[in-house]
């Protein structure tokens, strides 16, 4: 297993465990993701800097705006993690990561509602779902994106 992937996996697991228990994503772990992104940028160059810069803001800015409209829908730890992950994954990768996070987090929320309707006001940590989406996008993202764009073009 490459060192970057191993470090990213450990950091994302730590983010998931801490956010699940205390509903907080420590800045130090977000900085660690950002450092892996800088390391990736320096060693690989793919995605390019423009895609990475777009990835920083593509999800994080709408999250901030949504948080202004709907109070406390996201914590700012989630926003900062999306910004760091956007620099790691680029625009397409962070979109895929967020799609996976919303899909899995939404399924979890629906399962909670089916189990007990009194859970309607319960807050759910989003960090573990973001971490899952980031990891899947980092490991399998290019293949998933290539498959999806192929489907859009009419193929399987």
Image: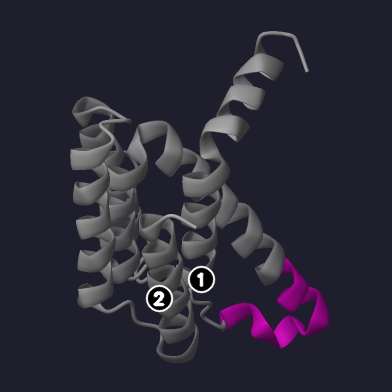
In this view of the protein, can residue 36 be seen by the observer? yes
Part of the protein shown in magenta: 110-121
For the residue pair 113 and 85, the one nearer the viewer reads as 85
Q: In which quarter of the image is residue 94?
A: top left
At which x and y percent is residue 123?
A: 51, 80
Q: Is residue 77 magenta?
A: no
Visible residue check, residue 73: no
Residue at the disc numbered 1 = 128
Label drawn at residue 15: 2
Q: Which of marks 2 and 1 is nearer the N terminus?
A: 2
User: In terms of secondary structure, where does tag 2 sit?
Assistant: helix
SS majority, magenta: helix
Please state the horizontal and vertical placement of residue 64, each as a whole percent of the image.
27, 55
Q: Residue 14: which quarter of the image?
A: bottom left
User: Dot 2, crowdedness within 10 Å: few (<14), some or many (≥20)?
Assistant: many
Taking 45 as reference, is 98 above or below it? below
Direction from residue 93 to residue 88 in the image, left or right = left
Residue at point 66% right, 25% down?
147
Which residue is painted at 43% across and 57% down in the image? 5
- Quarter of the image that includes the C terminus: top right
């Amino acid at each position: 297993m490459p060192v970057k992937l191993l470090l990213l996996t450990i950091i994302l697991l730590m983010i998931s465990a801490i956010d699940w228990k205390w509903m907080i994503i420590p800045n130090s772990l977000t900085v660690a993701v950002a450092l892996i992104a800088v390391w990736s940028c320096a060693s690989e160059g793919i995605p390019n800097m423009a895609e990475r810069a777009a990835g920083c803001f593509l999800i994080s800015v709408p999250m901030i705006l949504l948080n202004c409209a709907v109070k406390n829908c996201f914590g700012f730890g989630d926003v900062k993690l999306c910004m760091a992950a956007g620099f790691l994954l680029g625009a397409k990768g962070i979109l895929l990561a967020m799609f996976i996070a919303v899909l899995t987090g939404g399924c979890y929320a629906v399962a909670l509602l089916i189990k007990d309707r009194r859970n309607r006001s319960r807050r759910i940590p989003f960090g573990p779902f973001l971490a899952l989406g980031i990891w899947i996008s980092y490991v399998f993202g290019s293949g998933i994106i290539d498959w999806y764009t192929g489907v859009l073009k009419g193929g399987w």
